Image (spheres, rainbow, N blue to C red):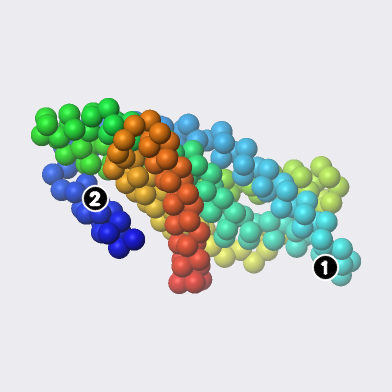
Protein backbone atom coordinates (compact mmCIF):
# COMPACT_ATOMS: atom_id res chain seq x y z
CA UNK A 1 0.00 0.00 0.00
CA UNK A 2 2.74 2.47 1.02
CA UNK A 3 4.90 1.36 -1.90
CA UNK A 4 2.03 1.88 -4.36
CA UNK A 5 1.30 5.34 -2.95
CA UNK A 6 4.99 6.23 -3.22
CA UNK A 7 5.09 5.08 -6.84
CA UNK A 8 1.98 7.15 -7.52
CA UNK A 9 3.59 10.30 -6.07
CA UNK A 10 6.80 9.72 -8.06
CA UNK A 11 4.66 9.17 -11.17
CA UNK A 12 2.99 12.55 -10.65
CA UNK A 13 6.38 14.16 -10.05
CA UNK A 14 7.83 12.69 -13.26
CA UNK A 15 4.82 14.05 -15.15
CA UNK A 16 5.68 17.61 -14.09
CA UNK A 17 9.39 17.44 -14.90
CA UNK A 18 10.68 18.04 -18.42
CA UNK A 19 7.23 18.95 -19.73
CA UNK A 20 6.37 19.53 -23.38
CA UNK A 21 6.25 22.93 -25.04
CA UNK A 22 3.13 24.91 -24.17
CA UNK A 23 1.79 24.77 -27.74
CA UNK A 24 2.06 20.97 -27.86
CA UNK A 25 0.58 20.61 -24.38
CA UNK A 26 -2.37 22.88 -25.28
CA UNK A 27 -3.14 20.96 -28.47
CA UNK A 28 -2.95 17.60 -26.69
CA UNK A 29 -5.17 18.96 -23.90
CA UNK A 30 -7.83 20.08 -26.41
CA UNK A 31 -7.83 16.63 -28.01
CA UNK A 32 -8.25 14.97 -24.62
CA UNK A 33 -10.96 17.47 -23.59
CA UNK A 34 -13.03 16.35 -26.57
CA UNK A 35 -12.65 12.68 -25.61
CA UNK A 36 -13.30 13.29 -21.91
CA UNK A 37 -15.89 16.05 -22.05
CA UNK A 38 -17.72 16.30 -25.37
CA UNK A 39 -18.05 12.53 -25.80
CA UNK A 40 -19.49 12.20 -22.28
CA UNK A 41 -22.25 14.79 -22.60
CA UNK A 42 -24.94 12.34 -23.73
CA UNK A 43 -24.50 9.85 -20.88
CA UNK A 44 -24.31 12.69 -18.32
CA UNK A 45 -27.52 14.21 -19.71
CA UNK A 46 -29.41 10.92 -19.53
CA UNK A 47 -28.21 10.00 -16.02
CA UNK A 48 -28.71 13.45 -14.47
CA UNK A 49 -32.18 14.03 -15.96
CA UNK A 50 -33.51 10.70 -14.73
CA UNK A 51 -31.87 11.03 -11.31
CA UNK A 52 -33.62 14.38 -10.86
CA UNK A 53 -36.93 12.92 -12.03
CA UNK A 54 -36.71 9.86 -9.77
CA UNK A 55 -35.65 11.99 -6.77
CA UNK A 56 -38.65 14.28 -7.24
CA UNK A 57 -41.14 11.42 -7.61
CA UNK A 58 -39.81 9.54 -4.58
CA UNK A 59 -39.78 12.64 -2.36
CA UNK A 60 -43.35 13.44 -3.43
CA UNK A 61 -44.36 9.84 -2.63
CA UNK A 62 -42.96 10.08 0.91
CA UNK A 63 -44.16 13.62 1.60
CA UNK A 64 -47.72 12.83 2.68
CA UNK A 65 -48.09 15.31 5.56
CA UNK A 66 -50.60 17.99 4.44
CA UNK A 67 -48.94 20.54 6.75
CA UNK A 68 -45.70 20.45 4.70
CA UNK A 69 -45.96 22.65 1.59
CA UNK A 70 -45.44 21.04 -1.82
CA UNK A 71 -42.65 23.50 -2.55
CA UNK A 72 -40.51 21.50 -0.12
CA UNK A 73 -40.16 18.88 -2.87
CA UNK A 74 -38.43 21.38 -5.16
CA UNK A 75 -36.23 22.57 -2.30
CA UNK A 76 -35.11 19.02 -1.46
CA UNK A 77 -34.44 18.14 -5.10
CA UNK A 78 -32.26 21.26 -5.46
CA UNK A 79 -30.28 20.61 -2.29
CA UNK A 80 -29.72 16.91 -3.02
CA UNK A 81 -28.76 17.64 -6.61
CA UNK A 82 -26.27 20.44 -5.92
CA UNK A 83 -24.65 19.03 -2.79
CA UNK A 84 -24.41 15.36 -3.67
CA UNK A 85 -26.10 13.84 -6.69
CA UNK A 86 -24.73 16.03 -9.50
CA UNK A 87 -21.02 16.09 -8.54
CA UNK A 88 -20.73 12.61 -7.04
CA UNK A 89 -22.94 10.52 -9.33
CA UNK A 90 -21.64 12.32 -12.43
CA UNK A 91 -18.04 11.66 -11.34
CA UNK A 92 -18.79 7.99 -10.66
CA UNK A 93 -20.34 7.64 -14.11
CA UNK A 94 -17.32 9.38 -15.64
CA UNK A 95 -15.00 7.11 -13.64
CA UNK A 96 -16.57 4.19 -15.47
CA UNK A 97 -16.47 5.82 -18.91
CA UNK A 98 -13.40 8.07 -18.82
CA UNK A 99 -11.35 6.12 -16.26
CA UNK A 100 -11.55 2.83 -18.12
CA UNK A 101 -10.78 4.60 -21.40
CA UNK A 102 -7.65 6.29 -19.99
CA UNK A 103 -6.38 3.10 -18.33
CA UNK A 104 -7.13 0.95 -21.39
CA UNK A 105 -5.50 3.39 -23.81
CA UNK A 106 -2.31 3.83 -21.79
CA UNK A 107 -2.16 0.12 -20.97
CA UNK A 108 -2.36 -0.78 -24.67
CA UNK A 109 0.37 1.74 -25.48
CA UNK A 110 2.54 0.27 -22.73
CA UNK A 111 2.28 -3.39 -23.80
CA UNK A 112 2.76 -2.50 -27.48
CA UNK A 113 5.93 -0.58 -26.48
CA UNK A 114 4.69 2.78 -27.79
CA UNK A 115 5.54 4.35 -24.42
CA UNK A 116 9.07 2.94 -24.65
CA UNK A 117 9.38 4.37 -28.17
CA UNK A 118 8.54 7.85 -26.85
CA UNK A 119 11.18 7.51 -24.14
CA UNK A 120 13.80 6.42 -26.72
CA UNK A 121 13.02 9.56 -28.76
CA UNK A 122 13.80 11.66 -25.66
CA UNK A 123 10.17 12.55 -24.90
CA UNK A 124 8.92 12.44 -21.32
CA UNK A 125 6.10 9.96 -21.93
CA UNK A 126 4.35 10.72 -18.61
CA UNK A 127 4.22 14.43 -19.43
CA UNK A 128 3.25 13.91 -23.09
CA UNK A 129 0.57 11.26 -22.52
CA UNK A 130 -0.76 11.79 -18.99
CA UNK A 131 -0.55 15.51 -18.16
CA UNK A 132 -2.97 16.57 -20.96
CA UNK A 133 -5.50 13.98 -19.76
CA UNK A 134 -5.40 15.31 -16.19
CA UNK A 135 -5.63 18.96 -17.27
CA UNK A 136 -8.52 18.14 -19.62
CA UNK A 137 -10.35 16.30 -16.84
CA UNK A 138 -9.84 19.23 -14.44
CA UNK A 139 -11.39 21.53 -17.05
CA UNK A 140 -14.25 19.33 -18.23
CA UNK A 141 -15.56 17.68 -15.04
CA UNK A 142 -16.84 20.97 -13.51
CA UNK A 143 -18.58 21.85 -16.80
CA UNK A 144 -20.26 18.45 -16.93
CA UNK A 145 -21.31 18.79 -13.27
CA UNK A 146 -22.89 22.20 -14.01
CA UNK A 147 -24.76 20.59 -16.91
CA UNK A 148 -25.86 17.75 -14.63
CA UNK A 149 -27.16 20.21 -12.02
CA UNK A 150 -29.35 22.03 -14.52
CA UNK A 151 -30.69 18.91 -16.17
CA UNK A 152 -31.34 17.16 -12.85
CA UNK A 153 -33.42 20.09 -11.57
CA UNK A 154 -35.19 20.24 -14.96
CA UNK A 155 -35.86 16.50 -14.79
CA UNK A 156 -37.39 16.95 -11.35
CA UNK A 157 -39.54 19.81 -12.67
CA UNK A 158 -40.88 17.74 -15.56
CA UNK A 159 -41.48 14.67 -13.39
CA UNK A 160 -43.22 16.68 -10.67
CA UNK A 161 -45.49 18.62 -12.98
CA UNK A 162 -46.30 15.85 -15.47
CA UNK A 163 -47.09 13.32 -12.71
CA UNK A 164 -49.40 15.81 -10.99
CA UNK A 165 -47.44 15.64 -7.73
CA UNK A 166 -47.16 19.44 -7.67
CA UNK A 167 -47.71 22.50 -9.80
CA UNK A 168 -44.99 24.33 -11.70
CA UNK A 169 -45.13 27.48 -9.48
CA UNK A 170 -44.76 25.32 -6.35
CA UNK A 171 -41.64 23.60 -7.74
CA UNK A 172 -40.09 26.91 -8.82
CA UNK A 173 -40.85 28.39 -5.40
CA UNK A 174 -39.10 25.42 -3.80
CA UNK A 175 -35.91 25.67 -5.84
CA UNK A 176 -35.71 29.41 -5.04
CA UNK A 177 -36.20 28.97 -1.28
CA UNK A 178 -33.19 29.58 1.01
CA UNK A 179 -30.64 29.25 -1.77
CA UNK A 180 -27.01 29.27 -0.57
CA UNK A 181 -24.56 30.25 -3.35
CA UNK A 182 -21.67 28.58 -1.50
CA UNK A 183 -23.22 25.18 -2.27
CA UNK A 184 -22.45 25.71 -5.95
CA UNK A 185 -18.83 26.51 -5.13
CA UNK A 186 -18.67 23.43 -2.89
CA UNK A 187 -19.99 21.20 -5.69
CA UNK A 188 -17.45 22.60 -8.15
CA UNK A 189 -14.60 22.09 -5.67
CA UNK A 190 -15.71 18.48 -5.33
CA UNK A 191 -15.83 18.05 -9.11
CA UNK A 192 -12.24 19.32 -9.49
CA UNK A 193 -10.98 16.96 -6.78
CA UNK A 194 -12.89 14.02 -8.31
CA UNK A 195 -11.52 14.90 -11.76
CA UNK A 196 -7.95 14.73 -10.48
CA UNK A 197 -8.55 11.43 -8.66
CA UNK A 198 -10.22 9.73 -11.63
CA UNK A 199 -7.72 10.87 -14.24
CA UNK A 200 -4.58 10.41 -12.11
CA UNK A 201 -5.50 6.98 -10.71
CA UNK A 202 -6.63 5.68 -14.11
CA UNK A 203 -3.49 7.00 -15.80
CA UNK A 204 -1.31 5.40 -13.12
CA UNK A 205 -3.01 2.00 -13.50
CA UNK A 206 -2.71 2.12 -17.29
CA UNK A 207 0.81 3.55 -17.46
CA UNK A 208 2.31 0.77 -15.32
CA UNK A 209 0.48 -2.12 -16.98
CA UNK A 210 2.61 -5.21 -17.55
CA UNK A 211 1.81 -8.32 -19.55
CA UNK A 212 -0.70 -8.62 -22.37
CA UNK A 213 -4.31 -7.95 -23.32
CA UNK A 214 -5.63 -9.67 -20.19
CA UNK A 215 -3.67 -7.31 -17.95
CA UNK A 216 -5.00 -4.28 -19.86
CA UNK A 217 -8.53 -5.38 -18.99
CA UNK A 218 -7.51 -5.90 -15.37
CA UNK A 219 -5.90 -2.44 -15.29
CA UNK A 220 -9.12 -0.85 -16.62
CA UNK A 221 -11.20 -2.67 -14.02
CA UNK A 222 -8.79 -1.71 -11.24
CA UNK A 223 -8.79 1.91 -12.39
CA UNK A 224 -12.57 2.16 -12.23
CA UNK A 225 -12.79 0.38 -8.85
CA UNK A 226 -10.04 2.45 -7.23
CA UNK A 227 -11.39 5.70 -8.69
CA UNK A 228 -14.88 5.10 -7.29
CA UNK A 229 -13.49 4.24 -3.85
CA UNK A 230 -11.31 7.38 -3.94
CA UNK A 231 -14.32 9.50 -4.97
CA UNK A 232 -16.43 8.23 -2.06
CA UNK A 233 -13.61 8.76 0.47
CA UNK A 234 -12.89 12.25 -0.86
CA UNK A 235 -16.62 13.02 -0.85
CA UNK A 236 -16.81 12.39 2.90
CA UNK A 237 -13.58 14.27 3.68
CA UNK A 238 -14.62 17.33 1.65
CA UNK A 239 -18.08 17.37 3.24
CA UNK A 240 -16.56 17.12 6.72
CA UNK A 241 -13.99 19.85 6.07
CA UNK A 242 -15.85 22.36 3.89
CA UNK A 243 -19.42 22.21 5.21
Tell me whether circle 1 and circle 2 mark residues in contact (CB < 8 Å): no
Q: Is residue 24 above or below residue 5?
A: above
Residue 196 in the image, given as x and y percentages of width and height = 37, 51
Quadrant of residue 107 within the rendered picture = top left
Quadrant of residue 66 within the rendered picture = bottom right
Q: Tell me the crowding category of disc 1: few under 14, some 14 to 19, or many 20 or more residues within 10 angstroms, Cα based.
A: few
In the visual, does 83 lie left or right of 98? right
Counting residues from the start of the chain, the first of labels 1 and 2 encountered is 2
In the visual, does 135 lie left or right of 49? left
Residue 64 in the image, given as x and y percentages of width and height = 87, 63
- Mark 2, secondary structure of its residue: helix
Q: Which mark is residue 68?
A: 1
In the visual, does 223 lie left or right of 156? left
- Who's the residue at 64% across and 47% down the image? 152
Q: Tell me the crowding category of disc 2: few under 14, some 14 to 19, or many 20 or more residues within 10 angstroms, Cα based.
A: some
Residue 191 in the image, given as x and y percentages of width and height = 46, 53
Residue identified by numbered label 2: 11
- Who's the residue at 56% across and 40% down the image? 44
Frontmost residue, 119 versus 44? 119
Residue 181 visible? The answer is no
- Mark 1, secondary structure of its residue: loop
Amino acid sequence: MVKTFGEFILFLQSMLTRTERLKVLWQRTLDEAILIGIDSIFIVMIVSAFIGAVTCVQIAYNLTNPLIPKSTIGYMVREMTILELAPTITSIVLAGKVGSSIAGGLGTMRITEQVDALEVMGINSASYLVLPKIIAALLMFPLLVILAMGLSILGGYLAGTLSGAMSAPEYVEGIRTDFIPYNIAFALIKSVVFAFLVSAISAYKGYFTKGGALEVGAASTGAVTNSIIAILLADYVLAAVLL
